[in-house]
Amino acid sequence: MITMMMMMVIIIIIIIIIIIIIIIIIIVAILGDRNVINKEAEKILKYKDLTIEIQRMWNVKRKVIRVIIGATGTISKSFRKYVSNIPGNYEVKELQKTAILGTAHILRKVLT
């Protein structure tokens, strides 16, 4: 049997967990090299309403992280700052390599 005291402890733990929740929205885009800075600004505006709505509906903190890389690995000046906010350990070189390999794969499919 669960006593009243145990029920209260469980409810308090659930409330603490709900308060600590932070929603992280990671926006990933790989595009032409000339548009990296423009696309970064566009993504900020595009997802602003969504993040405000999420915060209002679920009463949680929100964080938007923009990961935008050019098709040949071009990155913006603020890219390293954004990647450092993503939980985990990510190398910028590896992300650039992935973008370049993806571009090469698409070109190989199109040109053969």
Image (tube, rainbow, N blue to C red):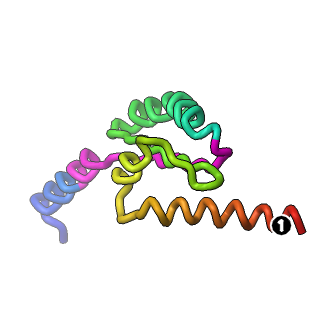
Q: In the rendered image, which quarter is residue 59 located in?
A: top left
User: Which residue sits furthest right?
Assistant: 112
At which x and y percent is residue 50? 51, 33
Q: Residue at x 36, y 65 (%)?
A: 89
Magenta span contains residue 71: no
Q: Residue at x 48, y 44 (%)?
A: 66
Q: In the rendered image, which quarter is residue 78 located in?
A: top left
At which x and y percent is residue 83? 40, 52
Q: Residue at x 79, y 62 (%)?
A: 107
User: Quarter of the image containing the C terminus?
Assistant: bottom right
Relative to 79, is 36 on the left or the right? right
Q: Is residue 22 above or below residue 105?
A: above
Residue at numbered disc 1: 109
Please name the amino acid that badge 1 sits on.
Lys
Instruction: State the extent of the magenta-drawn residues as a range.
Output: 14-33
Relative to 78, is 109 on the left or the right? right
At which x and y percent is residue 15? 23, 48
Viewer-nearest residue: 57 or 79: 79
At which x and y percent is residue 43? 55, 35
Q: Is residue 52 above or below residue 23?
A: above
